[in-house]
Amino acid sequence: MPLPIRDRRRLAQAETRCEGGSDSSTDCQAEKRLRRRGRSLLTWQAAVWAGGSLVLILGTLALVFFTGSPPTETATLPPVAATDITYGPAGAPVVVVEYADFQCESCARFAPMLASLRANYGDRVQFVFRFFPLAYHQYGMVSAQVAYAAHLQGKFWEMHDLLYERQKQWAGAADAYPYFEAYAKSLGLDMSRFRKDVNAQTTKDFITTQEAEGSKGGVSHTPWFTVNGTTLVPNDIGDFEALIDAGL
Amino acid sequence: MDRRQRIVRVALVVLALAGFLISFYLTITHYRHLVPPCYVTSGCESVLTSRYATILGVPLSLIGTVFFVVMFYLGIALITGPPKKVMRAYELLAFAGVLAAVVLFLLQAVVLKAYCSYCLGTEVIALSIWAGSLVVASSGDGGAIDEAGSPPQQ
């Protein structure tokens, strides 16, 4: 930025008077001071612009590189128990744990990836599903109860996939329960037992216990994944595969 | 320019930077097809995947990113001493920003009935920038400050 007009005028007058004159005159000294001042001002302004731009560029790069990248913190979640809902062999060298809510859209996006992983690694990796229904999801709890009731009849993963595939259908409904019943029927469940299990206190207790243990272990959002105890914030299926392959 | 004005103008730059970081993060998640996780205390995924999250295919977060970059550099111009036109542009953009923030807040509160913490953050920042722009406008000087932070001496 240029010097203020009054200073520029003084500088011009001083330059005129100093032409061929003595360096020691008052005006010539003033001219030097103004020149120094102008240079200093320009340097300071350039530093502010450059510094601001640098901060902006560094922030941009940090976000580009670190968004969605997996952290390496170790979760303090309960170990796999006999009561856990699992897929794959017990004692497998790699255990993938997921805390999820069936009404969570992000969980639904990851569901096909997990299905693909179960298909490809299901003989060598143990997949564990734990309930983490979010309070602000209208059907978060009841959909978990439905899935647990299906689990009691050995159809958890089938119901799991159905609930995520058709999430938009039931999550936006005024009453989602008829959809859940229809899914249960399509899976060939014993409907009287299903209805009883959905509303059983033991079902609700199982879900709330898993949710409480997850919260205590640091789960703050869904889906929350760990692979052999290491928390994973994946971008895509490749992030899972890299950790799984490293563990096999 | 007095000390209060300098502090306000620096704060405006910092606010614009914070707004940029939040908006740019959301833009990255949009283009990488990431759905932000469902947080325990928020409904951000409902808001960010709603039909109001884009305008003609352009994510609002990208518009917000551009807005905050412009406000960031205009804010720096306010610190280094802007011409009156820059100050006027800053005031107008800050006002446009707060109007957009109010509309987006109402969409969350009335239509979607879900709140996105990231969006609320940028809305509070837009509101703060507008408030700061009023303080800057009240100074009415628009002049430069020198390296020592004091007006040029005669």
Image (spheres, rainbow, N blue to C red):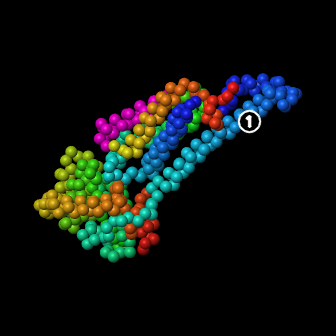
State the extent of the magenta-drawn residues as a range.
Answer: B91-114
Quadrant holding the C terminus of chain B: top right
- Look at 22% across and 65% down and name the residue there: A151
Q: Position of residue A111 (x, y in %)?
A: 34, 59
Q: Position of residue A116 (x, y in %)?
A: 36, 64
Give yes or no for residue B112 being in the magenta stretch: yes
- Please, which chain is the residue tagged with disc 1 on? A
- Look at 29% across and 41% down and name the residue there: B113
**Rendering quarter of residue A40:** top right
Q: Nearer the viewer, residue A214 or A233?
A: A214
B126 is higher (above) or lower (below) than B83:
below
Q: Is residue B86 found left or right of A110 in the rendered image? A: right
- Look at 32% across and 74% down and name the residue there: A89
Q: What amino acid type is highlighted by mark number 1? A: Arg
| One can see residue B129 in this view | yes
Q: Is residue B108 found left or right of A145 in the rendered image? A: right
Q: Nearer the viewer, residue B128 or A30?
A: A30
**Rendering quarter of residue A34:** top right
Q: Report the number of numbered marks.
A: 1
Main secondary structure type of the part rendered in magenta: helix
Crowd band around label 1 with a 10 angstrom C-alpha radius: few (<14), some (14–19), many (20+): few
